[in-house]
Image: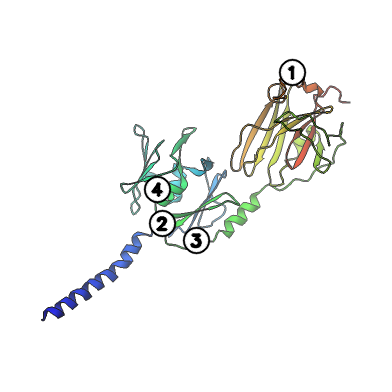
């Protein structure tokens, strides 16, 4: 055989090897995830919801804690995140001394993270994350996007519903219409307002605020609903228009407690109506996601004028307060049962 023919044969052989290798190389970029021997096409978490969704199935799988956002990243408990992404419990490792989490599922990259460290190892390759795994209430939480991508997933974020969406790399983005419909159906419905009580005083147009350097007023165009404590106990009230529900209010001599259900992390203030004085306090905290919680306000410490250095504004006296007002798009003005002038 001539040298020219040998060279041509070698080139053809190299070409065939390269062509045959392409599917194998492409396959390395794609991770097939199975649940009960079926390919998992999508995993969805929602901020604040103790439920996640696999392959668009609803209702979803239950969790005992909910994902949350911190430093702009979503954190999910290690076991639920790993299980949802196809890692079995027996392949989730924890080294207490090193505070090391290892995900070592056959067919997946080996992923290692250390609590408090922003380094992630995937098959020994180090990636610097912008956040680190953390521990809350004795539970380990991992940054969902970094871990999912390290395991071979594509990740997207739906800001309208607070969704983290994961699907196998190389697959088309999944259809989430069933999950979104289910989540929208779970939103608290705006309650029907019972008979509105006549106010003891007209709160609209009042001023002399407590917080900041601005005069606070409830303008005539703003909606005020006057209710009693009995009304509060019998109904829930959406004060934001978005499903942020006031479920209960408890009033003592020194404290005001407000039980909320929040759909999106908006915190509302409390006002006290005292004649022509409207004392106002915005909360000093905020949170993300759907959750139940109780906010408490100290009548003496919180609801007073922080900008009044002369002391001319007296400390609040709960017996002089006609209404406790929850501030939102709707102002829920609750008759104060401890008001001394109540007839």
Q: Secondary structure at mark 3?
A: loop
Which residue is label 3 attached to? 173
Foreground residue, 315 or 123?
Answer: 315
Which label number is shown at residue 33?
2
Report the side of 238 relative to 107 (left or right): right
Which label number is shown at residue 311?
1
* Residue shown at 16% from the left, 76% from the top: 7
* Label 3 with label 2: CB-CB less than 8 Å: no
Report, in whole angstroms, how far the alpha carbon at label 3 lies from the one at label 1: 61 Å
Report the side of 115 relative to 225 (left or right): left
* Residue shown at 82% from the left, 24% from the top: 339
* Residue shown at 54% from the left, 47% from the top: 51
Instruction: Using the image, determine if residue 159 lies above or below residue 336.
Output: below
Where residue 255 sits in the image (x, y, percent)?
A: 70, 24
| Image quarter hosting the C terminus | top right
Which residue is label 4 attached to? 88
Report, in whole angstroms, how far the alpha carbon at label 4 lies from the one at label 3: 24 Å
Report, in whole angstroms, how far the alpha carbon at label 3 lies from the one at label 2: 15 Å
Where residue 334 sits in the image (x, y, percent)?
A: 79, 33
**Residue 103 can be seen in this image:** no
């Amino acid at each position: 055989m001539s040298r020219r023919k040998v060279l041509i044969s070698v080139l053809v052989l190299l070409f065939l090897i390269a062509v045959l290798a392409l599917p194998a190389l492409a396959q390395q970029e794609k991770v097939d995830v199975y649940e009960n021997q079926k390919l998992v096409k999508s995993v969805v978490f929602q901020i604040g919801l103790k439920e996640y969704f696999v392959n668009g199935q609803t209702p979803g799988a239950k969790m005992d804690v909910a994902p949350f956002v911190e430093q702009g990243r979503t954190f999910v408990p290690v076991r639920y995140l790993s299980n949802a992404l196809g890692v079995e419990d027996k392949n989730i490792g924890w080294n207490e001394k090193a505070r090391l989490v290892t995900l070592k599922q056959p067919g997946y990259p080996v992923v290692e993270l250390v609590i408090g460290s922003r380094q992630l190892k995937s098959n020994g390759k180090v990636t610097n994350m912008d956040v680190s795994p953390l521990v809350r209430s004795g539970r380990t939480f991992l940054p969902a996007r970094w871990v999912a991508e390290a395991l071979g997933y594509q990740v997207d974020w739906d800001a309208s519903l607070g969704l983290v969406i994961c699907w196998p790399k190389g697959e088309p983005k999944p259809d989430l219409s069933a999950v979104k419909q289910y989540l929208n159906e779970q939103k608290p419905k705006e309650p029907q307002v019972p008979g509105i009580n006549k106010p003891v005083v007209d709160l609209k147009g009042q001023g002399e605020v407590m917080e900041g350097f601005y005069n606070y007023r409830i303008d005539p165009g703003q909606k005020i609903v006057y209710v009693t404590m009995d009304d509060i106990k019998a109904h829930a009230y959406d004060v934001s228009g978005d499903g942020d529900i006031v479920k209960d209010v408890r009033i003592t001599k020194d404290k005001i407690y407000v039980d909320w259900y929040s759909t999106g992390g908006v915190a509302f203030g409390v006002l006290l109506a005292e004649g022509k004085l409207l004392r106002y306090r915005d909360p000093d905290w905020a949170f993300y996601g759907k959750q139940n919680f109780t906010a408490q306000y100290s009548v003496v410490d919180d609801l007073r004028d922080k900008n009044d250095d002369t002391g001319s504004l007296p400390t609040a006296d709960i017996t002089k307060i006609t209404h406790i007002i929850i501030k939102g798009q709707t102002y829920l003005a609750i008759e104060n049962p401890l008001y001394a002038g109540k007839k």
